[in-house]
Amino acid sequence: MAVVYQKPRGLTDAPLSYCPGCTHGIIHKLVAEALTGLGVMDKTVGVAPVGCSVLAYSFFDCDMVQSPHGRAPAVATGLKRVMPDNVVFTYQGDGDLAAIGTAETVHAAARGENITIIFVNNAIYGMTGGQMAPTTLPGQITQTTPYGRDVSGAGYPIRICEMLATLDGVAYAERVSVHDVPSVRKAGRAVKKAFQAQLDKKGFSLVEILSTCPTNWGLDPLESLQWLKDKMIPYYPLGVMKDLTGQGGGQL
């Protein structure tokens, strides 16, 4: 019998425990495929902070370290500096990376730390109950914005990819999505490129991945995919924001 599909070797046998329709599982698959495709899974160390991303240490078949909330880039910096020949990545949500860990993220990027960050943006705090995040859209309803995010008091969402692309230490920054098959394939190429940038010692690389959160959005899985396409992508346009890797592409 021909094998049509199989679980990437870079993932453990543990069943995923995410909510139905959550796209974290797809993103895990892309990261695992990139690391196994590059032949570096056995020398990779991942850093998972607090939030839904903390579950990642059960699923990736490599060494994993748990960091305090928001501090994954700082922990990854220490790991990479003492083990420069290892591949070091963080797997972070938007509440973690763009709120609690803003300083750690920005300064790791400014220093040009040779690490890779996988940034999952679902526009809400997931594990902690669906509160407004720094990436929550204007007018979006959350547990802490029941009438929609009011920018007059809560400010505007942060476009992390564009912001970090302005820093000299950043070698590669791209925003992708996983709402349909062509987008998933493109996201996979971006993730692999980010890890290749690290292997080539180019500096800081980040892939921002637009993801769904059906539970906290109050939508079913199919509605969530459509909401991401219709609402998130217009505010967070997809594309390469910076590319100094020499692997092709360019800067917007």
Image (cartoon, rainbow, N blue to C red):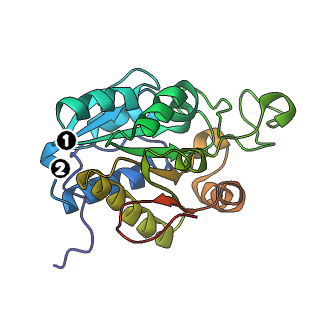
Residue 137 is tagged as: none
Residue type at mark 1 is: Cys
Residue that extends furthest to the bottom in the rendered view of this protein: 2
Q: Secondary structure at mark 1?
A: loop
Mark 1 nearby-residue class (10 Å; few <14, some 14–19, many ≥20) = many
Residue 172 screen position, x and y as percent: 43, 55
| Camera-side residue of 40 and 242 | 242
Gap between marks 2 and 1, in whole Å? 6 Å
Q: Secondary structure at mark 2?
A: helix
Q: Are marks 2 and 1 in contact (CB under 8 Å)?
A: yes
**Residue 116 shown left or right of residue 147 in the figure:** left
| Camera-side residue of 237 and 95 | 237
Q: Quadrant of residue 82?
A: top left
Residue 41 is tagged as: 2
| Camera-side residue of 98 and 177 | 98
Residue 62 is tagged as: 1
Look at 65% across and 35% down and name the residue there: 134
